[in-house]
Image: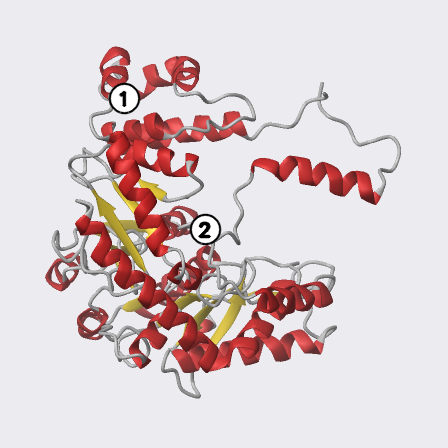
């Protein structure tokens, strides 16, 4: 029986007590021990200012900016600040969104519609992506009817290869994508070279800087960061998140365009129904102004000096990690210019290492890679300012993990793949065997497994199309209406 609405009102104390019980096993995003999903400064007053601003505007909708003029003012000011970071000028415009995926989808829509109305090329339009581009671009392609043309990255630098991109651009190309940085490895694509291709071929170039807010501050501190913003002539649009290294509450992002003309392709207006004219500057209609107000507050609370100090702390932690990880026998992948890095090992099962670290209160993000695609598994670290005080402790814990796991038996993933013949199984047969497979990997109704080593190694071993199918079924199994009791 499905869980019904309570017949009688619950008290505030009861509600909050229940929520505390629900969250008892959640990771603490402010602990400093998370290396993904959290961007922690350690500044309690910053959190307080952001939360107070959020609550002040949480009941105001961004749908109708004529009702709340303050929202229009804050959005224009946030966009101006972000445009100045990205070397925009008085022609640069943008929109505040609820996250990087929304920013990316808007930029892809604008590029697609520009292609259809200006270039008037054949259908379907194409998007040229380095293999390290974020999955949000694939999602946008699926939603918006574009074809993805994926190109390999340099195996050493893990950056886009301009010659490969140039070769992939054709008469159907609506846009090229570059990352500053890419999420898996923290490396910045050669945007200046991609900009030259975009100008030469007359195509749109979008720069995904969703996790690149910190890069302008790294540059100010003397770090070597390739040009990636509107200082590159061929760049048409840029996405930048504020809820990452802008330290604003989620979700907060901005999509920027070189000119007003380019943004017109993403704005939606409808006046053919009996109600009010619907005007959307983003994907969502009704949305709380809380995230916008909080982002505005954080930008002004930290200012340039505050962000420079956060960047210094990140660089200090990054330097410790880049020195300490190889000393423990790990290989750092690529040459990360940003605040992200990934490392792997030939001696230790890193899937088991990730679980071991979680048992010891550290969360690292597993990047399972793909045997079929020749992508090695790795552990991803998103470095926050608070890690300047914790990087040494993390490395010490990591050293203990290496010693404990050396020589430990594997996860049994290879044996399971062979026993169930997963890698060779036709998709139709896999559908029939899905209940058995989900049970074997510990997926139950409404309950996710606590240990992920087996699942992550299976992701590495089996082809991507099988991984995607199994994940759809696993998510469908996990997200089911709660039952009574």
Question: Residue 260 location, x and y as percent?
Answer: 45, 79
Could you tell me which secondary element the residue under label 2 belongs to?
A: loop
The residue sitting at 27% across, 42% down in the picture is: 399
The image quadrant that residue 415 belongs to is top left
Q: What residue does disc 1 label?
A: 413
Q: What residue does disc 2 label?
A: 37
Question: Residue 265 location, x and y as percent?
Answer: 45, 68
User: Residue 22: which numbered mark, if any?
Assistant: none
Examine the rendered structure and indicate whether residue 300 appears above or below residue 164. Answer: below
The residue sitting at 23% across, 47% down in the picture is: 343
Q: Nearer the viewer, residue 89 or 25?
A: 25
Q: Going by the picture, which residue comes out furthest to the right?
A: 8
Q: Nearer the viewer, residue 281 or 210?
A: 210
Question: Residue 219 location, x and y as percent?
Answer: 29, 77
- In the rendered structure, which disc, 1 or 2, sits on the residue that comes first in sequence? 2
The residue sitting at 43% across, 85% down in the picture is: 91
Examine the rendered structure and indicate whether residue 172 appears above or below residue 478. Answer: below
Examine the rendered structure and indicate whether residue 223 appears above or below residue 358. Answer: below
The answer for how far apart the CA atoms under marks 1 and 2 are is 27 Å
Residue 208 in view, yes or no: no
Answer few, some or many: residues within 10 Å of disc 1's Cα (few below 14, many 20 plus, some between 14 and 19): some
Count numbered badges in the picture: 2
Question: Residue 203 location, x and y as percent?
Answer: 26, 68
Q: Going by the picture, which residue comes out furthest to the bottom?
A: 90
Answer few, some or many: residues within 10 Å of disc 2's Cα (few below 14, many 20 plus, some between 14 and 19): few
């Amino acid at each position: 029986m499905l869980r019904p609405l309570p017949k009688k009102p619950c008290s505030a104390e009861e509600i909050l007590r229940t929520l505390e019980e629900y969250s008892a096993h959640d990771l603490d995003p402010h602990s400093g021990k998370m290396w993904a999903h959290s961007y922690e400064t350690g500044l309690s007053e910053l959190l307080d200012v952001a939360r107070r601003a959020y609550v002040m505007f949480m009941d105001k909708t961004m749908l109708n900016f004529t009702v709340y003029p303050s929202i229009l003012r804050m959005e224009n000011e946030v966009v101006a600040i972000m445009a100045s970071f990205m070397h925009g000028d008085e022609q640069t415009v943008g929109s505040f969104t609820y996250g990087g995926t929304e920013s990316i989808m808007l930029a892809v829509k604008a590029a697609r519609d520009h292609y259809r109305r200006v270039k008037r090329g054949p259908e379907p339009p194409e998007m040229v992506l380095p293999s390290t581009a974020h999955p949000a671009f694939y999602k946008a392609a699926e939603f918006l009817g574009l074809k993805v043309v994926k190109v390999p990255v340099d195996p050493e630098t893990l950056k886009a290869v301009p010659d490969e991109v140039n070769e992939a651009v054709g008469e159907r190309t609506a846009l090229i994508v570059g990352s500053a940085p890419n999420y898996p490895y923290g490396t910045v694509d050669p945007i200046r070279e991609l900009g030259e291709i975009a100008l030469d071929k007359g195509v749109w170039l979008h720069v995904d800087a969703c996790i690149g807010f910190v890069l302008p501050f790294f540059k100010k501190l003397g770090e070597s960061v390739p040009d990636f913003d509107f200082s590159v002539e061929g760049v048409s649009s840029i996405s930048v998140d504020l809820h990452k290294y802008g330290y604003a509450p989620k979700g907060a992002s901005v999509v920027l365009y070189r000119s007003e003309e380019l943004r017109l392709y993403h704005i939606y207006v409808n006046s053919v129904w009996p109600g009010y004219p619907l005007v959307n500057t983003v994907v969502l209609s009704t949305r709380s102004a809380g995230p916008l107000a909080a982002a505005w507050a954080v930008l002004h609370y930290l200012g340039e000096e505050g962000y420079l100090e956060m960047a210094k702390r990140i660089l200090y932690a990054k330097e410790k990690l880049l020195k300490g990880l190889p000393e423990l026998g790990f290989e750092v992948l690529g040459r990360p210019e940003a605040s992200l890095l990934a490392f792997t090992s030939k001696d230790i099962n890193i899937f088991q290492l990730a679980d071991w670290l979680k048992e010891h209160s550290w969360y690292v993000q597993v990047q399972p890679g793909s045997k079929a695609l020749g992508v090695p598994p790795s552990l991803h670290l998103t470095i926050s300012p608070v890690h300047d005080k914790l990087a040494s402790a993390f490395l010490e814990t990591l050293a203990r993990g290496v010693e404990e796991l050396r020589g430990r038996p594997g996860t049994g993933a290879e044996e399971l793949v062979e026993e169930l013949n997963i890698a060779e199984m036709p998709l139709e047969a896999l559908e029939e065997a899905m209940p058995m497979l989900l049970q074997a990997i510990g997926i139950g109704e409404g309950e996710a497994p606590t240990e992920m080593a087996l699942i992550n190694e299976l992701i590495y071993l089996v082809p991507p199309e099988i991984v995607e199918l199994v994940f759809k079924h696993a998510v469908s199994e996990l997200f089911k209406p709660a039952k009574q009791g």
